[in-house]
Amino acid sequence: MLIMLILFIVTGCSSKERAADVQGTSNGAPRVPEIARLKLPTGFRIDAYATGLDRPRLMALSPDGRLFVTEMGAGRVTILPDAGGAADSHITYASGLNQPHGIAFHGGYLYVAETNRVIRFHYRNGDNQGRAQEVVISGIPAGGRHFTRTISFGPDGRLYLSVGSSCNACIESNPQRAAISRYNADGTGRAIIATGLRNSVGHAWNPSTGQLWVTENGRDYLGDNVPPDEVNVIVDGGFYGWPYAYGNRVPDPQLGSKAPAKVRATIPPKIAIQAHSAPLGLAFYTGNMFPQEYRGNLFIAYHGSWNRTVPTGYKVVRFKIQNGNVVGGQKDFITGWYTGGSAWGRPVGILVGRQGELYITDDSGGRVYIVTYGR
């Protein structure tokens, strides 16, 4: 009894409540006390959908409505079945993968982007284990400063792959670096369609225009406030500046003078973001659960800074989009992952669920969150 009394005084909770923090609540939802620090607009709720993951990054919904996530730290793809608003188990779909990151369902297959290749598995509803693994794209340049690979499928049914730069600021020898390539669904017919993209981690297809929007992480070591991070709209043959320019055709102080024509040819960003925010995942809100003012908004996860005097990022923001254009400025949607001078979470991927809920991965905390409205 004395031990229990001391535990209550020190922790502020009973031993039963402390166990619930670790084991989960009575309805099966994993409990994360820190979630109380997160701030959202009135009417919204955020909960832990899954915990105990190893650097979860990007997500995809299967044709039968199950949530799949890449666990980059563990080298696996995991299924998180829904049991009333939270995952009731972790099912390993594929393991032994090389830093899996991008993930997408298309044409009866599950595609996974490893750091050096893209593979796919035949998928039937209810499958709990990957089968008939096939390499569809090989020879992707691996390693370097940016090693994650993101994939998505466009309205044209083709696969789009982004590969980041090998360095902070340099002239790449491999044309696939700092670029987005397009392939047929079987991996044939490669064409490099956009260049000058230092590290485009997030892909989102605008549902009204059919255009690919991507996040872009600007270079380091130019100070706290330059260059801006970006959201770019991809056009075939577009050049987006790196390493010669950033922002609205601002010459890079290291390499800009070497190619003035490249500086002039740079396509300015659709959205300029505070430097070092590290925008990663993004998604257009296509659901009906959230209020009308959120419909069609672009949500972006800011992973957070590592090299800024005053840290920035560590939040999810939104932008109002109309007819393919940004209307107004940035609005904070979820804040609070950075408190007390340190970060306890770093958001990465964003996915809109079938009921209009939002799923958000946190690779630092090893979690997937679920955001709902009016429940």
Image: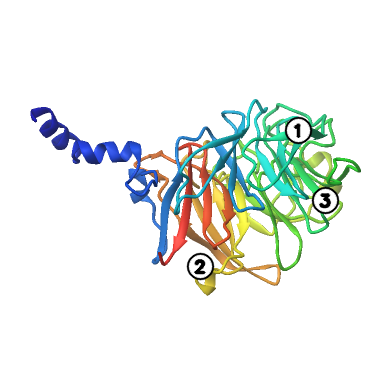
- Please provide percent x and percent y for residue 251: 74, 46
Q: Which comes sooner in the sequence, label 2 or label 3?
A: 3
Task: Classify 10 Å Cα crowding around label 1: few (below 14), some (14-19), many (20 and above).
Answer: some
Task: Classify 10 Å Cα crowding around label 2: few (below 14), some (14-19), many (20 and above).
Answer: many
Q: In whole angstroms, how far apart are the C-alphas of marks 1 and 3?
A: 19 Å
Q: Report the amino acid beneath label 1.
A: Gln
Indicate left or right for 242 with 328 as reference. right
- Please provide percent x and percent y for residue 328: 58, 69
- Please provide percent x and percent y for residue 1: 9, 30
Foreground: disc 2 or disc 1: 1
Is 337 placed above or below 290 here? above
**Residue drawn at the location 47% of the way across and 56% of the way down:** 371
Labels 1 & 3 near each other (Cβ < 8 A): no
- The residue wearing badge 1 is 133
**Residue drawn at the location 58% of the way across and 63% of the way down:** 319
- The residue wearing badge 3 is 158
Mark drawn on residue 290: 2
Q: Residue furthest left?
A: 2
Residue 241 appears in the picture as rendered: yes
Q: In whole angstroms, how far apart are the C-alphas of marks 2 and 1?
A: 38 Å
Q: Report the amino acid beneath label 2.
A: Phe
Q: Nearer the viewer, residue 115 or 192?
A: 115
- Please provide percent x and percent y for residue 89: 48, 40
Is 156 placed above or below 171 here? below
Labels 2 & 3 near each other (Cβ < 8 A): no
Q: Which comes sooner in the sequence, label 1 or label 3?
A: 1
**Residue drawn at the location 39% of the way across and 52% of the way down:** 38
